[in-house]
Image: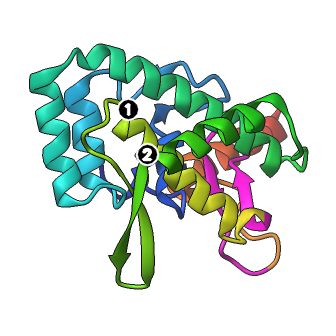
Amino acid sequence: MKEWDEKAFVGGHPVLDFINTVEDVDKSRTISRIARWPEFCAWANASTMFNSEQLNGLKDLAKQTDTSVILQRLHRLRELQYQALARIAAGEGGQEAELTELEVAIRQALQRSHLQAAEAGYLWQPDLNHEDWVSDLLLLSLEHLLRSGQLARLKQCGRCSWLFLNKGRGKGRRWCDMSTCGNRAKLESFRNKEH
């Protein structure tokens, strides 16, 4: 099973950490770190997105339904969210097809959700009795990011496809993580200068 340490949660927002659940040293996004249900559950447990009731709901889902179907939906949703946010990070935001499709899905998720008191106000929570509640939770997290006023800080790693919120001053971060992509890029640049 995959390990989920702090290097897996560099996005600065839970939905970005979900989008970043791929093994990626280039821009290919070909290897999912949540290819199996136990891997997704381990990620959910390590993330800040799921509360304890929802984590228990993930266990119940595994007993009640074919989790491979849920994972297919989650993978498709992840890539749809990635495409929309990567365009925004590149300054190509607008009403592209991906964002329009996500808007429809977010509206449906909101219709199936309820407000729940939280420390800093209220949060939308999915209906755990609905079969698509996991997707709804991920859509609600995306909706939160889109309204947060933080999209101007949205960046994509210069080496891989991971997205993150640049919370530094000025241009700030160019890499998802300096110890991985940043060091690889510097080493590559050094090698190119030698030749």
The answer to if 158 sits in the magenta stretch is yes
Q: In this view, does 10 lie to the left or right of 194?
A: left
Within 10 Å of disc 2 (Cα), the crowding (few <14, some 14-19, many 20+) is some
Please state the extent of the stretch shown in magenta in the rendering: 152-169
Per the image, label 2 sits on a secondary structure element best described as loop
Q: Name the residue that disc number 1 marks.
A: 132
Percent across and percent down for residue 95 are: 87, 40
The residue at the point 72 percent across, 59 percent down is 154
Within 10 Å of disc 1 (Cα), the crowding (few <14, some 14-19, many 20+) is some
Q: Can residue 191 be seen in this view?
A: no
Q: Indicate the quadrant where residue 96 lies.
A: top right
Frontmost of labels 2 and 1 is 2
Percent across and percent down for residue 68 are: 30, 15
Amino acid type of the residue that numbered disc 2 sits on in the rendered structure: Arg
Q: Name the residue that disc number 2 marks.
A: 112
* Residue 60: image tag: none
Q: Indicate the quadrant where residue 82 lies.
A: top right
The residue at the point 34 percent across, 22 percent down is 70
